Image (cartoon, rainbow, N blue to C red):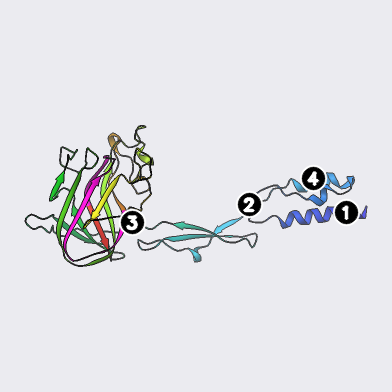
Amino acid sequence: MKVSKILMAAAMLGSMMLASCGGEGEQQSNAAETSVAGSKASSSKVSSSKFSAVWSKDASLHVEPTCDAEGKDVEVCLNSSAPNKETVLPKKAHTWGTKSAKVEAEGKTGYWTNECSVCHTKAIIIDALNWTKIEGSNKDSSGATLKFSTNGNYAEYEFNMPQALTNVTVGVYGWVDYWKDGSNNNDQRGFFSTKAGDGSANVGVKINDTDLTITNTKTYEEMGMTAGENGNSSFCLCEMGTVASIAAGDFKLTYTRLESYNLNITEIWLMYK
């Protein structure tokens, strides 16, 4: 009888120790299962008990995201010493001001400038409809956006870069059509959604004859576009990749359709500090 009571007490103690923030689940005692027959009925009640974690967000450890850096939410367990849980909060969008007056020169591409009021990232914004050379067909006959109809079509933009830039993030401002229509599945598409499925990008950007490495693997939806009327999406600024430096002086950018033409753009952005 003493052995039975000792084993029952051990089983209950083990069950209590397992009631931590590791999650909810049945707590079992192998010791109870191997005990004498007289203790099995009592130990089975202990083994089927369920315990819930008690988590709470700790405001003192919270880090608010900015347009410069990610933030984090931190949860602590109130009923054990389990490690804290951390959730990464994505960067916020820049808070852009009013674009400058358009800078233009005869035979050159027009552009604007802008600045984020929070982190002071600056931007040179190229007018995508003001190309210096176009090869192929701009599918948008209304002229409201640049949308190529054939693979290999491209537009060139040239102007005098007013200053040398470093660590420049290149983006396009635009939208996609045929949003989530079943055949295009644009909610699952982004810059790497070629029909060939070979992992290559469907648009290309060349800066002063050097190809930009496109690193953004997000879908259009993850980039901030939402479904709109008539199966089209909202506008969004989509970052494509980063170039280490751009020299002052003569500047040329080439935007090319490689396989997908459902991206309609109005502006090309060069963002820098």
What is the distance, in whole Å, between disc 2 and disc 4 at their CAs? 20 Å
Tell whether 24 sits left or right of 105. right
Image marks 2 and 4: residues in contact by CB distance under 8 Å:
no
In this rendering, the label closer to the viewer, 1 or 3:
3
Badge 4 marks a residue whose secondary structure is helix
Residue beneath disc 1: 5
What segment carries the magenta color?
240-267
Q: Which of 240 and 212 is in front in this view?
A: 212
Residue beneath disc 2: 23
What is the distance, in whole Å, between disc 1 and disc 2 at their CAs? 29 Å
Tell whether 204 sits left or right of 12. left
Q: Earlier in the sequence, mark 2 or mark 3?
A: 2
Badge 1 marks a residue whose secondary structure is helix
Residue 44 marker: 4
Q: Earlier in the sequence, mark 1 or mark 4?
A: 1
Q: Residue at x 21, y 41 (%)?
A: 148
What is the distance, in whole Å, between disc 1 and disc 4 at their CAs? 14 Å
